[in-house]
Image (cartoon, rainbow, N blue to C red):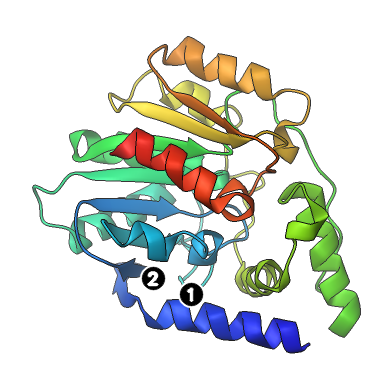
């Protein structure tokens, strides 16, 4: 447990560097740095911790604003019935409270967060300077991955289940599943209360991208598990909808590319938003 204790201390250190804000509906945000704003949306069963390896470096030149989306992390659950427009509306209003009315921002969404970012871009219009989709689904038919049950386990067995789930859906190279990844995964899993089944319409991004006037690019890991066997089709679907879109495929990385290949991911992201 010593490695996990050190990883939890590292998560706490990075969180302590942030300015914590809470907006309407109990949406919690963490802000680092100053400069042109970039807003980050995490993936399913996540929190700002999905960006734990990125926020400090991004904050050297940017105002980094990372949401805990409604029903995840520290944020309150959205009102019932849950709708994508309701979740996106709460996030759009939160951004409106955090930034001046005339401030434009780049919007980066990971996995589920990429689809929600599409809804937010539709709601905020010209305020979004560029949309970057990371590990995006919603462009082709989804691939379901069976996950191990975690909440009925304790101690070492529970941590082994987290490791297995990271291997199945998030990280390609087993050696990259380190104590920090496990600590983030465990915290995120324990604080995830929103289940998106029945809430997220299929092929959402494929329907949104033609009607939002925001430039859109995409980043995937080469071994993105939800796109296994269909990554070329996903990239082609994006290019068919947005011929001008830039697509970066990060070699050797899985779905959680911002963690597993942090520096390569950040280089690709900087090329897109800077």
Does 96 sit left or right of 25 as displayed? left
Q: Which residue is mark 2?
A: 28
User: Badge 2 local density, few (<14 within 10 Å), some, or many (20+)?
Assistant: many
Q: Earlier in the sequence, mark 2 or mark 1?
A: 2
Q: Are marks 2 and 1 in contact (CB under 8 Å)?
A: yes
Q: Which image quadrant: the N terminus?
A: bottom right
Q: Residue at x 29, y 28 (%)?
A: 214
Q: Residue at x 38, y 70 (%)?
A: 28
Q: Residue furthest right?
A: 157
Residue 268 x %, y %: 45, 37
Q: Residue at x 25, y 39 (%)?
A: 128
Does 109 sit left or right of 161 as displayed? left
The answer to which image quadrant residue 145 occupies is top right
Work out whether residue 220 can be spotted. Answer: yes
Residue 178 x %, y %: 73, 67
Q: Relative to the observer, which residue lies in front, 111 or 62?
A: 62
Q: Secondary structure at mark 2?
A: strand
Work out whether residue 154 can be spotted. Answer: no
Q: Relative to the observer, which residue lies in front, 173 or 197?
A: 173
User: Badge 1 local density, few (<14 within 10 Å), some, or many (20+)?
Assistant: many
Does 169 sit left or right of 120 as displayed? right
The dot on residue 142 is none
Q: Residue at x 68, y 68 (%)?
A: 189
Q: Which residue is mark 1?
A: 74
Residue 204 x %, y %: 52, 30
Q: Secondary structure at mark 1?
A: loop
The answer to which image quadrant residue 75 occupies is bottom left
User: Where 71 sits versus 264, above or below?
Assistant: below
Q: Which image quadrant: the C terminus?
A: top left
User: Where 51 sits versus 86, above or below?
Assistant: below
Alpha carbon separation for disc pair 2 and 1 = 6 Å
Report the number of numbered marks: 2
């Amino acid at each position: 447990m010593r490695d996990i204790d050190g990883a939890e201390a590292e998560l706490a250190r990075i969180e302590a560097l942030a300015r914590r804000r809470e907006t309407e509906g109990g949406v919690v945000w963490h802000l680092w740095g100053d400069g042109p704003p970039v807003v980050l949306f995490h993936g399913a069963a996540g929190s700002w911790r999905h960006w734990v390896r990125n926020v400090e470096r991004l904050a050297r030149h940017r105002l980094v604003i990372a949401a805990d989306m409604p029903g995840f992390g520290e944020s309150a659950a959205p009102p019932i019935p849950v709708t994508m427009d309701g979740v996106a509306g709460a996030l759009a209003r939160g951004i409106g409270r955090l930034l001046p009315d005339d401030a434009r921002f780049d919007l980066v969404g990971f996995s589920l967060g990429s689809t929600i970012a599409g809804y937010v871009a539709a709601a905020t219009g010209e305020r979004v300077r560029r949309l970057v989709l990371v590990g995006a689904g919603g462009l082709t038919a989804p691939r379901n991955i069976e996950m191990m049950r975690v909440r009925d386990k304790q101690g070492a067995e529970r941590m082994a289940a987290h490791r297995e789930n990271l291997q199945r859906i998030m990280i390609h190279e087993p050696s990259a599943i380190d104590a920090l990844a496990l600590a983030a995964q465990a915290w995120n899993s324990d604080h995830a209360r929103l289940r998106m089944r029945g809430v997220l319409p299929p092929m959402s991004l494929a329907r949104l991208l033609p009607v939002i006037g925001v430039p859109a690019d995409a980043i995937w890991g080469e071994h993105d598990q939800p796109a296994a066997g269909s990554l070329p089709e996903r990239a082609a679907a994006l290019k068919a909808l947005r011929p001008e879109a830039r697509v970066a495929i990060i070699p050797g990385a899985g779905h959680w590319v911002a963690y597993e290949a942090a520096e390569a991911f950040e280089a690709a992201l900087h090329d897109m938003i800077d």
